[in-house]
Image (cartoon, rainbow, N blue to C red):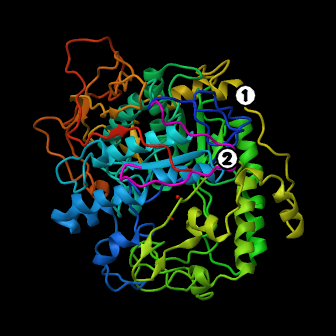
Amino acid sequence: MEDGTSFIYNNSFGGRFLELDPFNDSAKCQGDMPALNEPWDYSKNLISGVNLGGWLVTEPFIVPGLYEPFNPLGGDVNFNATVVDEWTLCEALGDNMTNVLTEHYETFITEKDFAEIAAAGLNWVRIPIGWWLIEVWDGEPFLANVGWSYFLKAITWARKYGLRINLDLHAIPGSQNGYNHSGKLGSINFLNGVMGIANAQRTLSYIRTLAEFISQDEYKNVIPMFSILNEPYAATIEVDTLRHFYYETYNMIRDITGIGEGNGPFITFHDGFTGTPVRNVTSGGWLGFMPGMDRVALDTHPYLCFSEPNNDGITYQAAKPCSYWAESMNTTAQQFGYYMAGEWSLAFNDCGKWLNNVGNGQRYEGTYYIPGNTTAPAFARLGDCEPWTNYPAYNQSTIDGLKLVASGHMDAFRSWFFWTWKTGYSEQLGMIANPVWNYQLGLEKGWIPENPRTIVGICTSLISENGFTVAMSENPAPTLSPWMTGGSGAGTLLDEAMVTSFSAWPPTALQGTTTEFLPTYTPTGNPITMPTPTVTSYPSGYSSSANVGDGWFNPSDTAGQMTPVAGCTYPDPWSGAGAAVPTSVCTGSADARMKMKKRSPSPSPTTPSSVYATITAQPRPTASRQ
């Protein structure tokens, strides 16, 4: 590895890794999976993936060691906690921020993790990133750009071991959900409030930059999927407003990439927590939304633990995903397109350190407080969390039960990404935190199946044995229509009335308030193109002329980057939800879409100040909350 250490790569599933050429796409994660340079059949090949949560976007419950120095009490309920998200962590770290976070990036996920993921029978990774990997604006305390160099390393490692990447834009300006993993805990200022449009415009600029990078020939085989926005909270944003944004994003990306299989990534929309079973568009859901869209997937995050607590038996818990979600997954795939569980875990209660934010407790123990309410727990106590968090004390019955819970989820979802690959060590607990959220630990200790790809059909018996009456369909998931996967008819939108309904950008109103006077940005800045890796060495006999790309796929895309309008005074982008609406216009272009145009003498794309990753050919080894 880069640090000079080595490890034995033992893949019992017939996977092969390649390191002879930094841009060789013929590696396979398992022998029966397509190589990276072969098409992924979304009707035939099921995704068995893990999230690399807590790495490039930190979360207190995943990496408590970063947050514990600033939360010395260590207890669950602490209304005075101040370091609660990456924003406040960066502020608290001060001059140590660069060293601390770089060390975290360097050590939390390494090449060895990618090798272990492939050897575990997994075939994809979902990698959450925040916008600060691209740039930060004044007042935003994040470590800018450095994380991008580690994302480039992830591409290298995924390519080497034959793993595909689902790039997940997890955190955006203004916050799309107010959760700590959006970068800043608090209010929602994306498509909500006075700065809602401006923050959405800025987000579109970053989506464009990322789409340009991953659509390049050098990277498209390794990153064939782009989850453009993690967990927007549709109850606040409103589903129709979110549909406007999704359709605008779809058009922008397909203007860059073109239509049809092989032209840019599969685009993934999160369902906005509209729930399963998925409803049709007229009922506030997604079935029937823009039929004919080219390669668009719907992502849902079905967790058992964030609802009213219960003491149902562990076998009954294992049957719940089969009863609650399996049929909906099939129905949605038939009517919408590719449907997957982008996050899930083994947790059927909310026991865990800081799972519900730093300073909050657990529903299960009766110590959970609804955010903003410090007077009474939201739920009565049901039991003690210690038996579920103290994994060294698990008996065989608990281990077998958790393994059954994992199997029920895997069979119900068919295509999925577990949240998350690993959780970090807690000095305050004296052990790894939150074990049922840790795939790596579960695999080692026995509560995660050794081969997730063999978990087919278990839902039928779980449902029957636990008294559920829902019918189970045959596995695998139904064959997708050709247009859903970039084949015949892809890009031919079939519902003209729906196109008319959602084509306006920006939308004319947010939460019933006209957007006429809301602040906007203007597309007159220099476009940002992301750095490419520098290949520093090659094995003997191999060319040193590899094309690493230039970070920008479509040279015809020369529109400017969104930037503040000179002379305009803007409200705080992070606290505009309650600010007064301006009474006069101080905006940029009314049509904020960054349209394609022919190359002109306009400014060339520029790179942010950044740390460039290097790709060095290594010696052959010696052998996902709330």
Q: Residues within 10 Å of mark 2 (few under 14, many from 20)?
A: many
C-beta proximity under 8 Å, tags 1 and 2: no
Choose between 310 and 502: the one closer to the eye. Answer: 310
Residue 217 % position (x, y): 46, 23
Q: Secondary structure at mark 1?
A: loop
Residue 622 % position (x, y): 52, 50
**Is 235 rendered above or below residue 59?**
above
The residue lying at 66 percent from left, 33 percent from top is: 34
Residue 568 located left or right of residue 365: left
**Is 21 rendered above or below residue 45?**
above
Is residue 608 shown in magenta?
no
Q: CA distance from mark 1 to mark 2?
A: 17 Å
Residue 249 % position (x, y): 45, 33
- Per the rendered image, the range of residues in magenta is 1-21
Q: Which residue is mark 1?
A: 481
Visible in this render: residue 195?
Answer: no
Choose between 242 and 90: the one closer to the eye. Answer: 90
The three-letter amino acid code for the residue at tag 1 is Ser
The three-letter amino acid code for the residue at tag 2 is Ser
Choose between 368 and 104: the one closer to the eye. Answer: 104
The residue lying at 28 percent from left, 66 percent from top is: 89
Q: Secondary structure at mark 2?
A: loop
Q: Assign the magenta stretch its main secondary structure.
A: loop
As drawn, which residue projects farthest toward the left?
567
The mark found on residue 418 in the picture is none
> Depth-wise, is mark 1 or mark 2 nearer the camera?
2
The mark found on residue 415 in the picture is 2
Sequence order check, earlier mark of 1 and 2: 2
